[in-house]
Image (cartoon, coloured by chain):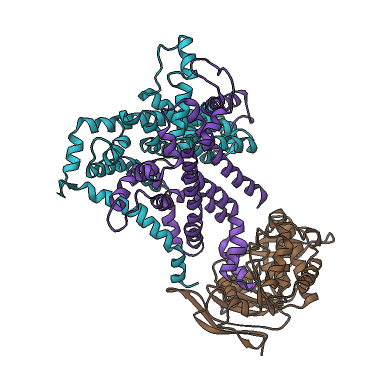
Chain colours: A brown, B cyan, C purple
Amino acid sequence: MSFVEIRGFGKAYGATPVFADVELDVAEGEMCILLGPSGCGKTTLLRAVAGLARPDRGRLVIAGRDVTAASPEARGVAMVFQHYALFPNMTVRQNLAFGLQQKRLPRARIAEKVDAALALMELAPRADARPAELSGGQKQRVALARALVLEPRLLLLDEPLSALDAQIRKRLRDELKRLQRETGFTAILVTHDQEEALVLGDQVAVMNAGRIVQAGPAREVYDRPATRFVAGFIGDFNLLEPDAVRRVFGEQADHAWAIHPEAIDLLPTAAEHGGLTAEASVIDVRIHGPVLRYLVSANGTELKVDVLNRSSIAARCPGDTVRLRLDRAQVREVA
Amino acid sequence: MPRRALLLWAAPFLLAVLGFEALPVLSVLAGSFVHGGEWSLGNYAALLSSRFYRGAFATSVNVSLLTSAIGLGIGLPLSLALHRRSAPVQRRFLTLFNVASNFVGVPLALAFTILAGVNGVVTLLLVRSGLVQDFNIYSLQGLMLVYAYFQVPFAVLVLFPSLGALTPDLAEQARLMGASRLTFWRRIGLPVLAPSLVGSFILLFANAMGTYATAYALIGGGANLVTIRIGELVAGDVFTDPNLANALAVLLVLALLLPILVDQLLLRRRA
Amino acid sequence: MPEPSGSLADRLLIGVVSLLLLLPVLAVVVSALATDWYSGLVPSGLTLQWFARVLAEPAFQAALARSLFVAAGSVVLQVLVTVPAILVAHCYLPWLDRWMERLMVLPYALPQVVLVVGLLGLYAGGPLPLTGTPWILLLGYLPLAFPLLYLPMKNNLRALRVQELLDAGHLLGAGDLVIARRVILPCVAPGLAVGLSMVFALSFAEFVFANLLVGGNFQTLAVYLFGQRTKIGQVTAVIVVIYFAAMWLSTLAALSMLRRRPI
């Protein structure tokens, strides 16, 4: 039995389903990512887990207790909202203490816990600041601290990093991972950012149009996308329809092929080779830091090819003719 | 919270609006069709055929149009000037204008009596300097001067927020594209502001049309304004006719509501 | 705007208009302090005797007390009746909120004198004879002053993500009422203070309802002032000054509350 079990969750607004037939298991201490495009129902699903939205059907078990009908505060969950939802009239310390006060903890216990949370999140110097005086990253850390100080059985995060700019987002992402490693909390995080999902997720559940289309370890979801949608959303896949497969590699395929750009090797035309090969010409080269992204055309089909950006490898220029090589085992067939 | 409990929180307010805003309006509307104890259009016929009441409408509309034009004429450049100042300066003067636009009614009339009455310092200055032969604050011209006193700051208050739509980059962009200041105002500035100018004018017009206390305190029953006539018909010393007052009130509201509704309709169509 | 801030022309325009706006106020203040100011450009001397005389007048004291009662009562009534309605509408009942927004135009479309006609028709006799009593003022000012409260409160409320705050509260174990009391009300306090000070000022100074609906039966300061308008200039000036001092003080009180809460 899993720590969090979602069974047959479904919800509709009138005739429009928001999510349906959702089954999800989260193990204790695991960070589960709900990944999907905006409007796919992932935030509403998260709110249903929190008890802020009522599912029309289904069952929810957290830590062995059926909480399907429980009120939000009785579920032992805490949530970090996209726009922080900090109480603007309270200082950082007061924000952190608020939930503990609702639990009627003794004053000294509250102070102790708040101080610990402030220290954990390195917020002690800003303890008496009001939210308006904080930077975006600080606000997000306060929101996280306010959730963690309650020692929730399950932490819910709704696009917690999306309102931040790129650099702070990366730093906070790493900090979140570190925190989870250190304190071992169980969490469900909603995001539309595939990189964030892969970096943070022990488990990634990809959602589309209200359904979970694939759930599994991050590596597995990345390597073996179950559907065309997952392939398109999670990796920067090359998606080849059967007739394109025939034209490029001369192979017979029943389904479309999904190929990671980094799975294709670029070789000189004369090189020895095994596996699938094709002749192609370079259209464009872009430097993405550690990798070079080539755009090549093979028999009228454009392909993306990623090569490690090492100085030992001579860069190819647009117009060059190259040979593509692909290991058949790297190909995912998707329906 | 259940919906019924929520409505309970709002119920006293809804009752107050019903009892002291909605029902009175309905009472006015219904009463306007009662003439001589039976349902008829007699009140309206009496009003529309009366030179006296038509004159009251003409005077009210004239005074209101003129003072609204004065209000916008001074208020727009004033708002623009204020818009170019720093935020603290803006706040300070907006507070002043807020106070001034609320300085209405009896105290305003008395202040002007002191300032520009028969023995007022302004009257004396004007007469002694030979600029005017004789200045009478208790006339329509005097009344308009007093109206202008609250119309100008009121215009700034309603116009100023909409100036935010004229961001500096609009003017800079226009200049970079070779537009002169005049061209900028003709092609961009005024068109951008046009809806709020029209909306502000309508509010100013309504503000003046509905004014009762200031005029009553300054000139009394002698001013032939619609509001004064209405007050007289319900609480006059000479004679009262509540149903005629109802009909006059309905006509006044129509005159105010019509431009507001047309404006809103136009705005919605544009949006 | 095209040019850098504060050109000479701008300053001049703002300065001149402001001066003109201050002129009547100045005239009232000087007149209230003048020994006599009948036919000169400046008064012949300054004195506080007019203040002493007006303040000692029992009719004035009674009128002031009545106006303070109406203004304070109006504020209390707004807090009890309108504030919960605005909060509930903003947080849960969007249809009511849209409706309230429409009420904002009413002061312009419905002159007070029109409402007077309707109120007289309904409450001059019949089962609920309220005219001639202060109650018609307290109740009549409720919808009349509503926009003064709604606008500044809405400005504060719009800046809050109320739904998220309520949700966050639920997860922290606090019900809607707790969040309303501990978070939302403190956050709208500035708007509330501004709104209530305007409600106070309106109810304190209002003349049309007070004169036409109640008149001599419960003479408020505005009606008393109107009755004194033919008296010597200094007496009316003193009353106007006191009248303004009261409104000014209430506004100042509200503004200082606003400054204490930098949100």
In the rendering, at what x and y percent does residue B119 appear? 45, 18
- Answer with the quarter of the image where residue A155 lies: bottom right
Viewer-nearest residue: A41 or B177:
A41
Q: Is residue B268 left or right of residue A198?
A: left
- Look at 42% across and 36% down and name the residue there: B204
In the rendering, at what x and y percent does residue B19 appear? 35, 56
Q: Is residue A4 visible?
A: yes
Q: Is residue A180 left or right of residue B88?
A: right
In the rendering, at what x and y percent does residue C220 appear? 44, 42
Viewer-nearest residue: C185 or B38:
B38
- Answer with the quarter of the image where residue A247 lies: bottom right
Viewer-nearest residue: A30 or B130:
B130
Compared to residue A21, the image places residue A271 above or below, namely above
Compared to residue A117, the image places residue B179 above or below, namely above
Compared to residue B195, the image places residue B2 above or below, namely below
- Look at 31% across and 51% down and name the residue there: B24
Viewer-nearest residue: A235 or C222:
C222
How many tags in the picture? Answer: 0
- Answer with the quarter of the image where residue A98 lies: bottom right
Q: Is residue B186 visible?
A: no
In the rendering, at what x and y percent does residue C7 appear? 62, 26
- Check the image and name the residue furthest to the right: A312
